[in-house]
Image (cartoon, rainbow, N blue to C red):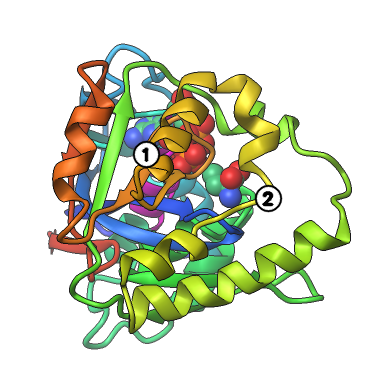
Amino acid sequence: MINVPRGKAVVRVPATSANLGPGFDSLGLALTLHDEVEIEIGTTGGLSVDVEGEGAGQVGAGEDHLVVRSMRAAFDLFGVKQPDAVRMVCRNRIPHGRGLGSSSAAICAGIVAARALAFPDFPGGGGDAPSEDALLILATEIEGHPDNVAPCLAGGLTIAWTEQSGVPRMVKLAPHPDVRPVALVPGHRLSTEVARGLLPAQVPHADAAANAARTALLVAALTTRPERELLMAATEDRLHQGYRAPAMPRTADLVQRLRGIGVPAVVSGAGPTILAFSTGDTQDLIAPEVGNDWHIQPLDVETHGAGVVSAETR
Ligand SMILES: Nc1ncnc2c1ncn2[C@@H]1O[C@H](COP(=O)(O)OP(=O)(O)OP(=O)(O)O)[C@@H](O)[C@H]1O
Ligand SMILES: N[C@@H](CCO)C(=O)O
């Protein structure tokens, strides 16, 4: 086993919105809201984790911290020895448990930083450095499903799926420049685990068929024809939002009201944040309908995925 050289890596990872309405566990969009993680490998001092911003004082600062667990899982996968001394600083801006992919961002940050530290010559040299496919497989294994980790790693709009063998795959598409996501973020949280617990084991065939059509239409609308009328039809869902509504009644109510005035709005990920697609003519409709209890955050699509801001070895 080789040692991870002494050094430091800083990585930046985007927030993501999964599902986008009908594309349950498959569609995802990277957003221009980021966490930054700095990891320094030393020789003595054990593990230290500082969390600034979102999650400070709430997430643990030990081996159970999600970035730490993901970094260590990556070192194991890469066949490198776990370093004795790790100093980590997490500068978080993605809110936790809101449906904006904070857990995927943490996982991807740990994995991408581990690759930068273990293979300092990557991507120029890097020899045996793990591929993007390998990172997707590991990140999905930790997260449980690929729809947030895919856009977090790749940026843009992604379609993720799982092969019969269980291996996750993805393709990245470029959304049309007129696609303008607006996140409506409430103050309260809902864990993905709780929201997934509300889903039935089986759904009516007619609902599955309706979602298949909407998902295909949504890919077309987001990439080539981001027109309000198409986006409205394309963001209808029957597979998860209704089942989860009892756990997020205010989200369900606001999605319905926004859709009622012609704003294509969906539950972001497992909620309770709402993602609205603002077209030129809907922009002014959103704020008056939403009121003061929600943080209205206009964002852009992030075209770059998780990336290394700086890396140095000593
Ligand atoms: N930056 C982070 N550092 C450490 N732990 C984190 C971080 N981000 C998220 N987590 C852990 O993940 C939990 C939130 O994950 P969860 O899957 O419930 O929601 P989410 O990822 O924010 O939303 P969604 O998956 O619906 O998009 C947090 O409560 C925390 O335990
Ligand atoms: N597809 C996932 C996204 C949240 O992690 C869900 O809706 O449960």
| Residue 78 visible from this viewpoint | no
Q: Amino acid at mark 1?
A: Leu
| Mark identifier at residue 159 | none
Judge by depth and name the residue closer to the eye, 251 or 151.
251
Residue bearing mark 2: 238
* Residue 239, x across and y down, in percent: 70, 50
State the extent of the magenta-drawn residues as a range.
Answer: 98-111
Judge by depth and name the residue closer to the eye, 256 or 140.
256
Q: Residue at x 26, y 87 (%)?
A: 125
Q: Residue at x 25, y 36 (%)?
A: 88
Task: Check residue 110 for magenta coloring.
Answer: yes
In primary-sequence order, the first of circles 1 and 2 is 2
| Residue 57 visible from this viewpoint | yes
Q: Count neighbours of disc 2 (C-alpha within 10 A) and say few if under 14, some if 14 to 19, many if 20 or more.
A: some
Q: Considering the numbered disc 2 on the image, is that residue within a helix, a strand or a loop?
A: loop
Q: Considering the numbered disc 1 on the image, is that residue within a helix, a strand or a loop?
A: helix
Direction from residue 207 to residue 55 in the image, left or right? left
Judge by depth and name the residue closer to the eye, 159 or 121.
159
* Residue 186, x across and y down, in percent: 33, 23
Pair 1/2: label in front = 1
Q: Quadrant of residue 108?
A: bottom left
* Residue 231, x across and y down, in percent: 40, 64
Q: Residue furthest top?
A: 57
Residue 134, compared with residue 299, is above or below; it is below
Q: Residue at x 49, y 44 (%)?
A: 269
Q: Amino acid at mark 2?
A: Arg
| Quadrant that contains the C terminus | bottom left
Cα separation between marks 1 and 2: 17 Å
Task: Check residue 296 for magenta coloring.
Answer: no
Q: Count neighbours of disc 1 (C-alpha within 10 A) and say few if under 14, some if 14 to 19, many if 20 or more.
A: some
Residue bearing mark 1: 258
Judge by depth and name the residue closer to the eye, 230 or 167.
230
